[in-house]
Image (cartoon, helix red, strand yellow):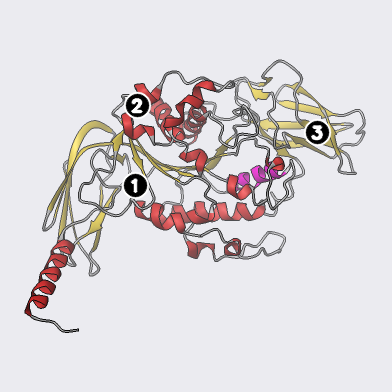
């Protein structure tokens, strides 16, 4: 190619412009005006600049300095701060100066998953027509006005740094319309109970399997069960491993968080997954905690709602027990510390609807869980009855539960339903279930020597078994084949 003088002049100008651009401090999208910083933890601030450039950060009486490394990356930590409703400015200086405004200090949570977590507040009309459970106390979509709840919507192809720094919004008006309903109602209830600013980050993609949310290199593992059996490498299932991790999760790291909320699994349930999903779920939880350099970060998730998978036209046939087996695989994550789950078997109007509209109640239940387990308010009842152990007594099975609340109950006053029992032949039949104190006694006339019991073990099960706080009992089977094999 022939270059004349004007070519070289243009090339020099472009090179100078590129150098000038690189010399500017740039911040990740998540660091912006109106953000909420996590209280009582060291707060990470990071970005890029020229190699060797000195960077200073001033905020809330703190002045921290660092130097960009040879690749232009820099990071520092602010000392832990107490919650504050006072809007503050953060000044970041290098060769240029960035001033971030209207910053609060409080509690920050990241919510992620697929369509039921992404399910936006704009679908509020579905909330109003719901026939079961709690009604929304008010029209939050149009009346929300709490500027102390801030939201950040993590979109695909959106997370590249930009000079505007307009990442966060108050949870009201147009920004709230597209935000996760579960995330917003979690924040609303948490704010009412803690009275500190709340920051919510939503990173969810409809229809996504779990694999895209896991760094692809982390999928190259071959799980081994306690009995020595080895599963096929997790990456063998495909699923675009790392696709959303790379574009939506990695850009958030290491923004200081209190914990994670997760609502996903339908796409993997359609694949008839059970123990393999459990290991993928474990991999996601552990890898995200490692990314944030905190192995104790709370990870709370939603058990999938009842849905008629067996009636769908799919390459893989589904039985009515496939969903309960998937619930079981989700619950295996409870082997990890600081994990827990909520049941929503009562929040479905039709099992033909994969997206039930009770997001305000799901958000509230996640908040109850967080308030009890993370924030130490042990008087808060956050779960319905959870299977603990069984005891065979003559021709009955005596089942003991935790999470009793004020006591075991029937929601409609009728006999408890969706209990089954089996003898040595393994054939389950409908059982009578009677409440006796904190136990349930199950039996069936045709089963003289029972060996196992199940509850809610069907994709359509919406039982009347609750505690007196109205929270549904969690489905289970006493003959779970995986619990003692998972590691």
Q: In the image shown, does 111 or 332 lie closer to the viewer?
A: 111
Residue beneath disc 2: 195
Q: Residue furthest top?
A: 413
Residue beneath disc 3: 420
* Sequence-first tag of 2 and 3: 2
Q: Residue furthest bottom?
A: 2
Q: In the image shown, does 210 or 124 lie closer to the viewer?
A: 124
Q: Residues within 10 Å of mark 1 (few under 14, many from 20)?
A: many
Q: Which residue corresponds to the image point at 21% horizontal and 47% vertical from the top-left?
A: 164
Q: Which residues are magenta?
A: 322-335
> Residue 35: percent from the left, percent from the top?
28, 40
Q: In the image shown, does 450 or 461 lie closer to the viewer?
A: 461
Magenta stretch, main secondary structure, is helix
Q: Is residue 181 left or right of residue 93?
A: right
Q: Is residue 441 left or right of residue 268?
A: right
Whole-Å distance between the Cαs marked 3 and 1? 46 Å
Residue beneath disc 1: 256
């Amino acid at each position: 190619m022939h270059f004349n003088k004007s070519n070289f002049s243009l090339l020099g100008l472009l090179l100078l412009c590129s150098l000038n651009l690189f010399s500017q401090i740039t911040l990740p999208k998540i660091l912006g005006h109106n953000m909420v910083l996590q209280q009582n933890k060291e707060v990470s601030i990071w970005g890029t600049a020229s190699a060797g450039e000195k960077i200073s950060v001033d905020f809330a009486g703190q002045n921290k300095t660092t130097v960009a490394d040879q690749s232009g990356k820099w990071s520092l930590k602010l000392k832990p701060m107490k919650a504050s409703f006072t809007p503050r400015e953060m000044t970041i200086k290098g060769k240029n100066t960035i001033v971030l405004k209207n910053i609060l200090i409080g509690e920050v949570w990241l919510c992620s998953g697929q369509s039921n977590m992404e399910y936006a507040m704009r679908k509020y009309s579905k909330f109003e027509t719901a026939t079961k459970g709690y009604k929304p106390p008010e029209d939050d979509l149009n009346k929300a006005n709490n500027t102390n709840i801030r939201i950040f919507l993590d979109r695909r192809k959106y997370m590249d740094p930009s000079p505007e720094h307009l990442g966060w919004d108050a949870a009201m008006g147009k920004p709230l319309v597209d935000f996760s309903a579960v995330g917003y109602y979690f924040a609303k209830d948490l704010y009412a109970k803690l009275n500190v600013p709340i920051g919510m980050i939503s990173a969810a993609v409809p229809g996504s399997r779990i694999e895209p949310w896991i760094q692809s290199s982390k999928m190259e593992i071959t799980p081994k069960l306690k009995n020595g059996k080895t599963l096929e490498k997790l990456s063998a299932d495909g699923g675009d491993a790392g696709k959303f991790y790379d574009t939506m999760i990695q850009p958030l790291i290491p923004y200081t968080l209190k914990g994670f909320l997760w609502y996903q699994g339908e796409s993997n349930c359609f694949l008839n997954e059970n123990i393999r999903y459990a290991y993928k779920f474990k991999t996601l939880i552990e890898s995200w905690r490692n990314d944030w350099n905190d192995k104790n970060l709370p990870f709370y998730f939603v058990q999938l709602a009842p849905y008629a998978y067996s009636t769908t036209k799919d390459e893989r046939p589904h039985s009515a027990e496939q969903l309960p087996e998937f619930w079981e695989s989700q619950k295996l994550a409870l082997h990890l510390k600081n994990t827990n789950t909520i049941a929503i078997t009562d929040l479905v109007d039709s099992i033909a609807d994969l997206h039930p509209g009770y997001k305000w109640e799901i958000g509230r239940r996640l908040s109850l869980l967080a308030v009890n387990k993370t924030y130490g308010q042990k008087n808060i009842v956050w779960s319905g009855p959870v299977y603990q152990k069984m005891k065979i007594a003559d021709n009955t099975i005596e089942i003991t539960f935790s999470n009793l609340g004020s006591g075991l109950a029937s929601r409609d006053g009728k006999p408890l339903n969706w209990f089954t029992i089996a003898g040595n032949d393994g054939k389950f039949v409908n059982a009578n279930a009677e409440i006796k104190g904190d136990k349930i006694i199950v039996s069936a006339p045709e089963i003289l020597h029972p060996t196992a019991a199940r509850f809610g073990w069907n994709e359509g099960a919406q039982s009347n078994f609750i505690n007196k706080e109205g929270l549904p009992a969690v489905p289970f089977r006493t003959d779970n084949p995986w619990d003692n094999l998972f590691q």
